Amino acid sequence: MNPVRRPAEPAMARNTIARIHPDAIAHNLRRVRESAPDSRIMAVVKADAYGHRIDLCLPALADADVLAVATIEEARAIRRLGNGLPVLLLEGVADPGDLAVAAELGLELTVHHRQQVEALAAFGRPVTPRIWLKIDSGMHRLGVEAAEAAQLHQRLLELPGVEQVNLMSHLACAEQPDHPLNARQLARFDEAVFGLDGEHCLANSAAIFNWPAIHRDWVRAGIVLYGISPMDQGCGADLDLRPAMTLTSELLAVNHVPKGERIGYGGRFVTPEDMLIGVAAIGYGDGYPRAIADGTPVLVNGRRCRLAGRVSMDMITIDLFGCPNAKIGDQVVLWGEALPVEEAARSAGTIPYELVCRITRRVRYRAQAAPGMVSKVK
Ligand SMILES: *Cc1c(COP(=O)(O)O)cnc(C)c1O
C-alpha cells in the first residue's frame, strides 16, 4: 500500500492579504485616551475585532480597561488567547444555560431585559461582581425601559456576588451632534438613573471625538481603534487616527483592450479608448463588495487607478491609465494608509464598518508595522 502522501506546501499561495498594523491600533487607543482623558476605555472587539482578527489586535490593546464583545464565543476566543483583561458581553447572555459558562470564563454581563434579571436570580450563584444595566433611552433596540431602571438596578444589587451595577445606554445619532434625538436620549437617561449608584457609559466612537460632555465614567471605543472614522464624511486621518488594515492583492494579468470593448460580467464597462486593463486577484469571494462602482480608486504600485467593470468572485478589473509599466505580480492596494477604506465604502454605498467586517476566510492575515509608521520608528 502506498503511504498517504501529505499535500506539499503550496509553492505560491494567493497573494490576497489583509495586513494588520498593531502599532496603528496602539496609536489609535492613545488617541482615544487623549480625547477622553477622564474616562476609562472599553475597547470593542466584537466581530473578530471588526474583521481585523482578535489574535492580531489584542497585544496592541493591553492598555484598555475592558474588552467588549457581542457573543460568548468571541469572549471564549479572548480567554483562549490567555488575555487577562475584563471581558464584557455587550448583549449579556440570551440562553440561561450560558450563565455557567460566563461564570467559568469570568465575564461581565450586560443586562438589557427584565428576563435576564430573572435568569440571573434563578441561577442563584455568583456570575460576576460587575453588571452593566443597559437602559433604552430612545434608540429602541436594546435596553430596559427608563421607568423600570431603578427597580431592576436594585434587584441586580441584591443578587449573589454582585458588587457594582453600572449604567449604560446607546445613542442612535452620535455621529450627528446636532441631531435632536441626542438631547432627548441624554435627558431620558439622566432621569432614569437619577440617584442610582454606578458608573455611566454612553459614548461610542463618534461621541468620543465630537461630544465630550457625555464621556462620563466610561467610553466605548470601536471603529476608531481600527483607524476608521465614525463620521459620515472624511476619514480617520482627520482625527489623527491610523488605519489598522491594508488590504492588498496583486495583478494576475495585464491586457491591451481596444476601444469599444466590454469588460467583465454584464459588459458594464465599455472602453472609451484603447486601454491597458489589469486583472487583480480579489473579488466578492474575498469580501470586496460586488456593489462597488466603476471608477472606485485602487492603488497599483502606489498610484491611483480606477475600477473598470463589475467585481467577480475572484477578480477585479482595473483601468491602468497612469500605470503604463504595470506588470503581472505588481501590488494592488484596495484600502489602507494611502487609500482610506471610507472612500471605498462610499463608492460601494455602505459604511466602512461593513467592509472590514466582511472580509472572508480566504484572505490571509499578516501582522506588520503600519507603512507610515516604520519611518517614524527609525
Ligand atoms: C459595537 C458597539 C459599540 C462600538 O461602536 P463604534 O461606533 O464602533 O464605536 C459601542 N456600543 C455598543 C453597545 C456596541 O454594540
Image (cartoon, grey):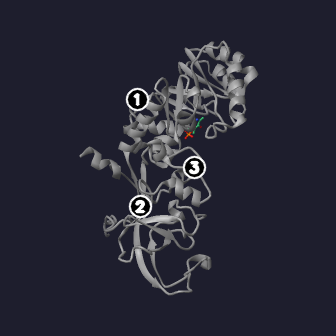
Q: CA distance from mark 3 to mark 1?
A: 37 Å
Q: CA distance from mark 2 to mark 3?
A: 24 Å
Q: Write the residue at 74% across / 20% down.
A: 148
Q: Quadrant of residue 78?
A: top left
Q: Report helix, strand or loop for mark 3.
A: loop
The answer to whether residue 297 is above or below residue 374 is: below
Q: Which residue is mark 3?
A: 233
Judged from the image, the quadrant occupied by ligand 1 is top right
Q: CA distance from mark 1 to mark 2?
A: 33 Å
Which one is earlier in the sequence, the residue at label 3 or at label 1? 1
Q: Residues within 10 Å of mark 3 (few under 14, many from 20)?
A: few
Q: Given this view, does label 2 or label 3 mark the residue nearer the observer?
A: 3
Circle 1: residue type: Gly
Circle 3: residue type: Gln
Which one is earlier in the sequence, the residue at label 2 or at label 3? 3
Q: Write the residue at 68% across / 15% down.
A: 194
Q: Which residue is mark 2?
A: 248
- Residue reaching furthest to the left: 378
The answer to whether residue 373 is above or below residue 160 is: below
Circle 2: residue type: Thr
Judge by depth and name the residue closer to the eye, 108 or 58.
58
Label 3 near ligand 1 (CB < 8 Å): no
Task: Pinpoint residue 164: horizontal percent, then vertical percent.
Answer: 56, 16
Q: Which mark is residue 84?
A: 1
Q: Residues within 10 Å of mark 2 (few under 14, many from 20)?
A: many
The answer to whether residue 367 is above or below residue 266 is: above
Task: Pinpoint residue 108: horizontal percent, then vertical percent.
Answer: 53, 26
Which one is earlier in the sequence, the residue at label 1 or at label 2? 1
The answer to whether residue 252 is above or below residue 36 is: below
Q: Write the residue at 46% across / 60% down.
A: 362
Q: Quadrant of residue 200?
A: top right
